[in-house]
Each structure stands twice: as structure tokens, then as C-alpha cells.
Image: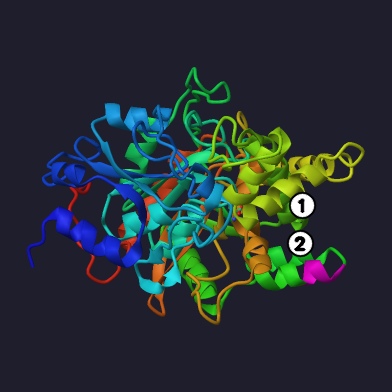
Amino acid sequence: MNETYAQYFKAWEEKTGAFLEYRDDLLEKAAAVTNTPPSLAGLPFAVKDNIAVRDFSLSCASRFLETLRSPYTATAVRKLEEAGAFVVGKTNMDEFGMGSSTDLSALKTTNNPWDFKRVAGGSSGGSAAAVAAGQVPFALGSDTGGSVRQPAAFCGVVGLKPTWGAVSRYGLVAYASSLETIGILSDTVERCRAVFDVIKGADPFDQTSRDSPAAQVSSKIIGVLSPEAIAKALAAGTGGAAHKAAEAAALSPAVAHAFDNAKAALSALGYQLVPVEFPALHYAVPAYYTIAAAEASANLARFDGVRYGKRPDWAENPDDMIDKTRTAGFGPEVKLRILLGTFVLRSGFQDKYYHRAQQIRAAIRRDFERELGGRDADARCCAILAPVFPTTAFSRDGDGLSPFAQKAADIWTCCANLAGLPAVSFPVSVEDGLPTAVQLLGKPFAEGVLLDIAAACEKAHPFPHPKNWQNFWPQAA
Ligand code: GLN
């Protein structure tokens, strides 16, 4: 079979629906790439539709911004363009990045390339599906509580959430600023490293972005955050919700099997594995949703029908206009989180919710620092190994995951965001026809350390691909 790249791209697109928008003329341009990795010259890439690319859509998969065209380009995208890569299209996502399946997109459904009846994960599900199908060699996403790593795991690709501040957020539509980073989804670990090397660094347009020398770590000890350790942390509390949360965080047999495989692979590579416990994770999910909702309610306040959004044909007064615009423009999950955010920030209630969540966040950071060390000091471990999500890609019929279970499952990913740490997820094996993955977390600016370990695993166990996958891109030797 000798399909052209454009035909291949479109054949997958019909089945998965990864893109909200792509350009035919650009598919032609991507036809013959002959660079030598790690060069990105000539490579097409995809960008989640909450990251600005001039003259492309910037809908955040919301009715509210459905017709918005971006007048400017995000710094991370601009740097990739300067390195010779180019954007072919914008990918689907959960509305404003709120979700774990991409089914909360108000605009389109995206299917998993391994099984079209299953979700691609979220919220960067379109970017993950596009890379897994080989439509693009890499894509940008955003990770506020796991939205790069979880869809990467569901689709069988590499997902990097960088250290908070390592990559400029200029041009990323804000959901929860103190938690989120622009992240990378890619076909191989080396491609991920090449992209990260291009997009990282201080940017005058984002005062929270930093240049920092890559952290070096000499330890060969990896701390294992096991399902038993999480169960123990959750059991420490009281009440039915903690019990239900522990149930939702428990690994499915397929993921548990993959986790054991990953431990064996790392031991075979010469790493010593030691168990670690982070008791503060008991409160990780409540703290994450409190902070994320609070920041979302502030960040989304600009969407009022005056500056952005479709206005109603008629309104009684300005309040009525804002009310009508938001009622029609936002989906139910977005409304829920804005309301929750204004609730936890209500005057007189901030100490009870928001400030407590910040204290929990500090405790989680200290838990990780004890094992990984900080900026100037090493500790016992070079990385922490953990599952990414308790299940493989879930289906839409019958055995889907409840909204509560999806949120409780974020315990595995949201801790890296609360602590501001880098984390990379990568494929381990295929179980029952679906990819599985694990993640490695490191100290601030230790992306290189994590990628080195992931690359060694990839070499020992090359990553799997879905049926009918073809490679169009030069690979590192
Ligand atoms: N599931 C998380 C949430 O819904 C992840 C979001 C994200 O990382 N953007 O908030």
C-alpha cells in the first residue's frame, strides 16, 4: 500500500476525529521530510486548541469561543516554528481543559486510535490520538492535573509535563495558572527531548517562566509510589468519600500488571527500587479541585460576551447580557467548576477551603522533596515511579467511568502539578489490545534525568503502535 501522507492523515481523521481544524495545503507540505533527528526541520505538528496559533482557531473546544481566530502565536509554538517545524492543525480537548476523556468537548467527539469505541483520554485527547495514529510525530498539549500524561497513556505515546515555569505559558488560555504547563506528546522519547529543548526557557511575555540549568542527579535509586501506598494514604481519613476515592484509585488488573512489568524493566536496567510513602496525598484530589476551581473562576471571568463570545440577540441590561452569554456558551462541567470556584473563594470561607488547600499543597511538595531533594540538594531518589491512571482507555458504553471516579483517579497525576514537578509518562505494554503506561516524576528541572530513564526503557521495550499505523518521520538512530 502506497498511501500519500495526506491520504493517510485523512483516513485516520475520519475514524478518530482528533482535529478541530487542519489545513490541506499544509499536509502537502509535510509530504517528504528528510531531516536528521534531533532536528525538527520540516516536521508537521499539532497544537491543542487552547494554545494560540495565529490565524488558526482558538476555541478551547467551547461554544463560547467557537468562532475565535487567534491574532497571535504562543511562545512555545513560535520557537518550534523558528526551529523549522510547522503547525498542521488544532486538536480536540475537553472544554477549557476540564476533563479526563475529551468527551466534554462541546464541538466534537474524538476516538482512541486503538479502539474507536473508547475515549482518547483528556483533556489533551486530540493531541494524543493524532500522535498515536502517526498523523503527526509530536503535538503540544496542556497539563493542569494530568491532561498530557493521561491521554498519552490511553493512546500509547510519550507525554511530558515539564517543571512549572520551565516553558512559557504565553498563548495558553488559562484554566488554573499555578498548576498548569504546556506539555509535549510525541512518538519517541528522543523526539520529546528535542521538542522540550526548543520550547523551554525564560520568556519576557511570561514572568513566571525561567531559564534553569538542567538538574543533574547521580543516584540510581527510584522510589516506587505503589497502589498500596496510595491505599494507605487514603485509608488514613474518615468518611465514605475517602473509601470511594480509594476504590477509584485502585489499579485495574491490566494496569497493575503493566506496573509490575515496568518495575522489572527498571531493575533490569540497574536501578534500585525502594518503596516511598507520601501521606499528604490523602488530600491531593480535594486540594487540586479546590485550587483548580478557584483559579478557573478567576481566569474565566473574562468570558462575558463583552470582550469574547457570542452575545445574545437581545438582553434587558448588561447583567442579563452576561448571564445569557454564559448560559449559552459554557458546558455543564465548566459552569460547575466556576460555581465551585466562587464558592471556595467566598469572603469568610477562604480559610476553610482555599487556604487549607494551599497548606495541603505545601505538604505534598515537602513529601516529594524529602525523597527527590530540591533545587540545590539531592536526596535518596533520582525519580519516583507511579502509575498514570487506574485503568486503560475506558469505553463509552456500559463500563465507562463515572465523573466521580474520573476525578478521584486524578490522584496519580495531579500531585506533580500541585508540587510543580516534571513528570513523563511512557508506554509499557499492550494489555487486552490497549496500551498501558507508567510515569516518572523528578525534582524541578530534572526533565533530562527522567527522559534518560524513559529512553533506556524504550530501547529495551520499543513502544507499540495501533493497527494500520505507518511511520512517515525520520527517527533518531
Ligand atoms: N482531569 C483533570 C481536570 O479535569 C485534568 C485537567 C488538566 O490537566 N487540564 O481538571
Q: Residue at x 79, y 66 (%)?
A: 242
> Does any atom of ligand 1 lie closer than 8 Å to the CB of label 2?
no
Relative to residue 77, is residue 275 depicted above or below? below
Q: Is residue 278 visible?
A: no
Relative to residue 138, is residue 376 depicted above or below? above
Q: Which residue position holds label 1?
A: 280
Q: Residue at x 40, y 27 (%)?
A: 72
The x, y position of residue 64, in whole percent, is: 53, 45
Residue toward you, 466 or 251 = 466
Residue toward you, 174 or 391 = 174
Relative to residue 22, is residue 202 depicted above or below? above
Q: Which residue reaches farthest right? A: 348
Q: Residue at x 61, y 58 (%)?
A: 412
| Cα gap from disc 1 to disc 2, whole angstroms | 7 Å
Q: Residue at x 46, y 44 (%)?
A: 59
**Residue 128 location, quadrant:** bottom left
Q: Which residues are magenta?
A: 239-243
Q: Which residue position holds label 2?
A: 233
Q: Is residue 263 left or right of residue 456?
A: right
Q: Circles 1 and 2: CB distance less than 8 Å?
A: yes
